[in-house]
Image: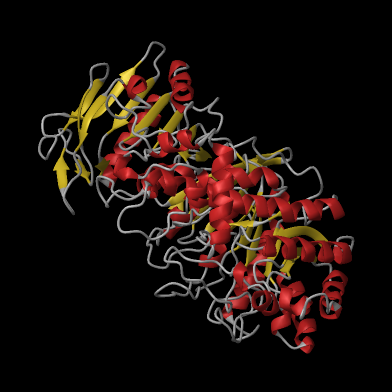
Amino acid sequence: MGRPRGGDPMTRWAGPWPTDGIAYGADYNPEQWPEEVWADDVALMRQAGVNLVSLGIFSWGQLEPEEGRFEFGWLDRIVDLLHEAGIGVDLATPSAAPPVWLHLAHPEMLPVDADGLRYTHGSRESWCVSSPVIREHATRIARVVAERYGHHPAVRMWHVSNEFACHNGRCYCDVSAAAFRDWLAARYADIDALNLAWGTAFWGQRYASFEQVLPPRRTTTISNPGQTLDFDRFSSDAFVDHLEAEAAVLREVTPHLPVTTNYMVMGDFHQIDYTTTTPLLDIVSNDHYLKADDPRGWAELAFSADRLRGLAGGDPWLLMEHSTSAVNWQPRNLAKEPGEMLRNSLQHVARGADGVLFFQWRQSRAGAEKYHSGMVPHAGADSDRFREVVGLGATLGRLAEVRGSVVEKARVALLWDTQAWWATDLEAHPTVDLHYLDLARRLHGALLDAGVVVDVLPATSDLDGYDVVLVPTLYLAPTDLSDRLAAVVAHGGHVLVSYFSGIVDESDRVLLGGYPGAFRDLLGVRVEEFAPLRENGTVRLSDGATGEVWTERFTAADAEVLATYTDGPAAGGPAITRRTVDGGGAAWYLSTRLDGPALAALVGRVVDAAGVAPVVEQPGGLEVVRRTGESGRWLFALNHTDADLPLQAVGVDLVGGGTHGRGDLVPARGVVVLREGA
């Protein structure tokens, strides 16, 4: 039936964390530089407080210049040099960048796009994940590297490949087609079951056998949505299988070392369902980069970090990559302001990271990413940027005691789901203006501004203990979610479900009888028709709020109407409802995208009804998160404004030093981390 959704949460790595304190460092690519630079690099790392670097990520061609001939001398020397300096190594398997000789010998391993065009070598991740060639050679080189370096005292963990599916997330070649058919045959009892699931009676697409099925390659018009959704699942599972294969080799050779790979939980990336990869990892790691054109980039950072923490089951995780300043791949790559690198880094730590690493150590002189910032910029160590790097290292050293603690469990959960995201992206939906993460980010941002911590969880997660559960645009919901939400309400909790949630089953077939089919009974409403708005259109609600993008024509037979539409395509009908049950719990329904202030007000009503309060009372613009552990509690306060703001808390400030009194100020664009109770 294919891989199950979700799975057991990751269990905490039983062995030691890769570093004594908070991990600090970067991807290090010494092969880009003459060997005489290496000693300077290591000296500068010691000056900066670096204690962990990732090695070998793109080094396959350097390690194996031709098949079966290895050149390890350079890597031997740099690993020894780092060990002598007390710097640990996160050693990579190099499958992210196969060598040119492998591509030339096996051009069939190169991916093919939906138009049938085969890519060529010359970049990275230029391989089809279903190719037996890359699987054979990737596991072979992983074994060679593990056997040579797995017991070197410098090596602290394994870094499997790099940013899986970043550039090769979907391949439409014949090898992928055959693997897709095998996957379908395992998922469906027979071809009739597939025809039923995909609705192939429409447009005469019925299949007589699995052998007739292809990937959703370019065709005359809209592809079958069930086929596209299953191809997304298959492609994700193929990367899971590849990760599992490389990790199995590493665990066989070096069971004493933890295994990780760097996720890309940020922005719009959703090529892999990370709920299925997380059980394969000992430590969950993430790459995160700000979008320069996002004025509230810090809010997106918080949302992504909370998503990552939810995947990690609340355990500490590792920030494997972010940037000291500008990146190179956005239309306009803006440099970070003074202090922004520190604030970004500590924001990740506040939300559960026990490591802060960058791409990369030394800014490249040549290549595609030469204008991507590094810990050592082109200007060298005599630069403000490197002085900030040294300052951050000193700050993380003072925060070493935080390592191993966890973010205090929230009373509010926000649900998200990669498969719902894939399904929402399918063509021919009611409007192009509805985007999966849009409302999720808005809800999270409203809670962030209110100082309420939220756990952002996979939709398959256990919801016990949460007083508020938010369900934004969950178009395709897990089949048991309605029952789990009903249990939250029955125990006195509050659930807020939004428009375009619970609409289809796992095959993208509409749940009949009125929308939202999965949640009608829970909410006490029945939507007869979607009524999306014209481009940039708005409607007014009876409570004075403005609705955008979407409205619905529905009835509320078993729910209280809190606001109605006063104009627009659903004028006179309900817009926001609440169904209250015995015991005080309630299921709320939101049928439009509210403007910012109105959404914040609605979220405030819901959390107030549940008795949820901020971490500490604080003015807008001050982000406050608490981490707790066996040895204490630490309060992180990050000021995202241009004004000094008061923090109503007491403790020893581990960033600036000294004692912080109740109401003392957090400097504009500054950070305070308090050891509470000291």
Quarter placement of the C terminus: top right
Residues 447 and 80: in front is 80
Residue at position x 32%, y 23% in the image? 520
Q: Establish if 69 lies above or below 655.
A: below
136 relative to 420, above or below: below
Quick check: 249 above or below 128? Answer: above
Residue 152 lies, in percent from the top left, at: 89, 64
Quarter of the view holding residue 66:
bottom right
Tell which of 14 and 204 is nearer to you: 204
Q: Nearer the viewer, residue 470 or 385?
A: 470
* Residue that lies at the very extreme toward the front in this rendered image: 208
105 vs 164, left or right, is right
Q: Farthest top residue? A: 582
Q: Quadrant of residue 671?
A: bottom right
- Residue 617, given in percent of the width and then of the height, sits at 45, 39
The image quadrant that residue 355 belongs to is: bottom right
Q: Which image quadrant: the N terminus?
A: top right
Q: Is residue 208 left or right of residue 46?
A: left
The answer, for residue 258, to whether it is visible in the render is: no
- Percent of width and height locating residue 357: 65, 64
